[in-house]
Image: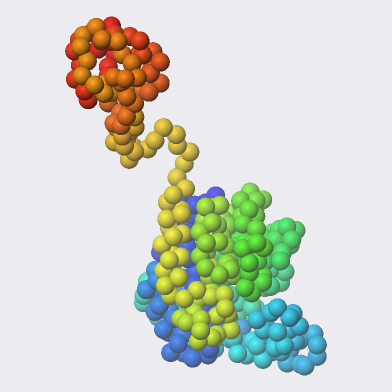
Amino acid sequence: MLDIQLGHITIGPSHTPFIIAELSGNHSQQLDLAIAMVEAAAKAGVHAIKLQTYTADSMTLDVDTADFVIKEQNSLWHGEKLHALYQKAATPYEWHKVLFDKAKSLGMLAFSSPFDEAAVDFLVDLDVPCFKIASFELTDLPLIRKAASKGKPLIMSTGMASLSEIEEAVTTAKQAGCSDIILLKCTSTYPAEPTNTNLLTIPHLAQAFGCQIGLSDHTAGIGVSVAAVALGATVIEKHFVLDRSAGGVDAAFSLEPHELTALVTETARAQLAMGQVVYGGTVAEEKSKQYRRSIYVAKDMQAGEIFSADNLRIVRPAFGLAPKHWDSVIGKTAKTALKKGTALSWQWIA
């Protein structure tokens, strides 16, 4: 599995997990709030911010029929008309350069999810380092073909997708010239529950497609993301908000700044902790071995005295004979006088 280079950042199994803060529509169409979000994301230590590039008209039709109204009772957006929801959540095109430049000035990468072919061309002009294909667009093969043709890496979310649909998307991207592909395991419910996240799909996806796998995480908190890193995820994408209580279209399943900081810290720890298969202790543990137990003289003894449970003890530290020799020692005699606290050695045993 080859590393992938995005700007100045290398993504791969031996590198710190790549953390993406998804602004989505949580800026509530206030540019000053969006800029503050970018600044907070940088302070939290994330590697990239991500936008979504669409207009309500490029996303759906402005009609009132039942097909275009969200009917799911448990949806955060129940009863919303699609066109109105996308109008409210859209990031104005004129903001993109402002937010991208701000992110770059703070040392982060900045890119976006295009939702139509014109958005791909718009983002190319802004020199994005990659494209992100959203789960709901994974079956839009013409969009994938267009994005993949631009010579940039492709990150694709796989929420709801069957194995064959993922294969179609990956094949389409490769045929269009894109070889740097990262697939994100995703559960397309908002919020998602840990019980329907199915992280064991991550190593299966890696094996099936021979590419890096990450997680687009819509669950609360950071636990699921940390677990994903332990299963091989190299990329974590999380929605971000300055203050959940202040609202925002995705606020309910978005991380606040202190949580985003914890995500960066704990996923890095998880990656470092993976290591390799090791038995017998590490080099760092070598000095600790002295605090194992061993056999010590527990009472002053005379030469010729018989070793017994009365005058020997198995205690810490480990400078005497190992406890496994206890049965071999009991009943033997001391060659010489031994003081209490002497680490028992074969040289003292007749």
> Residue, x 30% and y 10% (percent of image)?
306
Closer-to-camera residue (183/303): 303
Return the x and y of residue 7 as percentages of the image width and height: 44, 66
In this rendering, is residue 267 above or below 316?
A: below
In terms of depth relative to the viewer, which is nearer, 302 or 192? 302
Residue furthest to the front: 310
x then y, percent, for residue 256: 47, 76
Q: Position of residue 94 (x, y in %)?
A: 51, 89
Of residues 122 and 208, the one drawn nearer to the viewer in this rendering: 208
Residue shown at 75% from the left, 58% from the top: 164
Q: How is the image coloured?
A: rainbow
The image quarter in which residue 87 lies:
bottom right
Is any atom of residue 102 visible in this view?
yes
Q: Position of residue 29 (x, y in %)?
A: 53, 90
Q: Is residue 253 left or right of residue 312?
A: right
Where's the C terminus, which quadrant?
A: top left
Tell me: residue 278, above or below residue 337: below
Q: Is residue 303 left or right of residue 108?
A: left
Q: In this rendering, does residue 321 appear at all? A: no
Q: Residue at x 42, y 72 (%)?
A: 258
